[in-house]
């Protein structure tokens, strides 16, 4: 039996761990640097038909229907006046078993970790990766050392594992945009709350979509925003009320009408990696 180690217990790491778990030729272990798996409430995720096809390989179709939503259209609006531009019928891409789906991120994570009980080790922050013959040696900051035959790196854009392997050749870069997200408590005027609403404008766009049958609406906006190198490294900045107010002031006027209806508001910088 081959030992497989997965670094990172996010969506991709948990998904591939589920695939390996279904093959008796592999023994799988997931190492997560945080003390627990992040289960932020509310925030949504959109899953394409191809994503659903993959997730059905590990039983996603068994997830309760009240935990997910299947929108039929993407409606495009102008940010300038919130007039509708056009629509895309996404049911054209659906099949009987695979439909474009939206749901809470926490619901997806809960589903992915259900069958991995005992295989996820939290509090394991990688410090060194060595390959000796056909074995890979993993050293962690808690002084534990583990060996595996195969290593899967899925610890995100700030991947420490990838940096260790590439000798810091793959540093993430700030791409001059901020993401603003939250949950809407009220449907904005002229917006179809049963489908995905994409509002487009220069240097700012936002997406609103339902994430369950209860009518909860996910909000995510992307805004062009310059940050100094010092600001990029100051993660506490994004919890600072004066900074948040400064960012929100730059939202186009037409989009400010429903800011008071946003709860669990969070702002964070968007980084990209080679």
Image (cartoon, grey):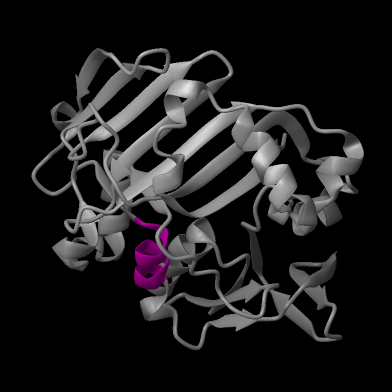
User: From where the camera sits, is residue 270 visible?
Assistant: no
Indicate the position of residue 89 as horizontal and vertical percent values: 17, 24
Q: Where, quadrant-wise, is the C terminus in this rendering? A: top right
Count how many numbered circles sit on residues in the image. Answer: 0
Along the line of sight, which residue is nearer the eye, 173 or 119?
173
Q: Residue 256: x, y in percent? A: 47, 31
Lateral position of residue 16 relative to residue 158, left or right: left
Q: Residue at x 70, y 81 (%)?
A: 123
Image coordinates for residue 92, horizontal then vertical, percent:
14, 27
In the depicted structure, whether residue 151 falls above or below residue 235: below
Q: On the picture, is 108 further left or further right than 39?
A: left
- The residue positioned 25% from the left and 62% from the top of the image is 60
> Residue 157 location, x and y as percent?
68, 47
For the stretch drawn in magenta, the main secondary structure is: helix
- 238 vs 145, left or right, is left
Q: Is residue 111 magenta?
A: yes
Between 26 and 62, the residue placed more toward the observer is: 62
Residue occupying image coordinates x 64% and y 65%: 150
* Residue visible at 66% across and 35% down in the picture: 247
Decide which of 227, 133 is in the foreground and name it. 227
Vertical relation: 126 (above or below) 116: above
Q: Nearer the viewer, residue 9 or 80?
A: 80
Residue numbers of the magenta segment: 104-112
Q: Quadrant of residue 245?
A: top right
Is residue 201 visible in the rendered image? The answer is: yes
Res. 2 image quadrant: bottom right
**Residue 155 is one of the magenta-drawn residues:** no
The residue lying furthest to the left in this view is 96
């Amino acid at each position: 039996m081959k030992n497989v180690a997965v670094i990172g217990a996010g969506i991709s790491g948990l998904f591939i761990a589920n695939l390996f778990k279904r093959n008796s030729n592999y023994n799988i272990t997931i190492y997560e640097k945080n003390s627990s798996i992040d289960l932020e409430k509310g925030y949504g995720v959109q899953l394409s038909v191809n994503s659903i096809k993959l997730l059905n390989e590990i039983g996603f179709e068994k997830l309760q229907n009240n935990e997910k939503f299947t929108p039929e259209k993407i409606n495009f609006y102008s940010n300038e006046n919130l007039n509708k531009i056009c629509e895309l019928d996404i049911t054209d891409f659906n099949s009987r078993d695979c439909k474009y789906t939206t749901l809470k991120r926490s619901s997806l994570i809960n589903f992915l970790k259900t069958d991995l009980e005992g295989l996820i080790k939290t509090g394991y922050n990688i410090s060194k990766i060595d390959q000796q013959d056909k074995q890979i040696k993993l050293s962690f900051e808690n002084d534990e050392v583990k060996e595996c035959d195969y290593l899967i790196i899925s610890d995100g854009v700030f991947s420490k594992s990838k940096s260790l392997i590439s000798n810091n050749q793959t540093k993430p870069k700030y791409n001059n945009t901020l993401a603003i997200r939250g949950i809407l408590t009220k449907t904005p005027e002229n917006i179809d709350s049963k489908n995905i609403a994409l509002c487009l404008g220069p240097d700012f766009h936002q997406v609103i979509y339902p994430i369950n049958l209860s009518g909860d609406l996910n909000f995510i906006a992307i805004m062009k925003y310059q940050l100094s190198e010092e600001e990029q490294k100051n993660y506490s900045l994004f919890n600072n009320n004066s900074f948040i107010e400064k960012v929100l002031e730059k939202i186009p006027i037409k989009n400010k009408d429903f800011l008071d209806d946003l709860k669990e508001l969070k702002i964070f910088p968007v980084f990209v990696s080679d």
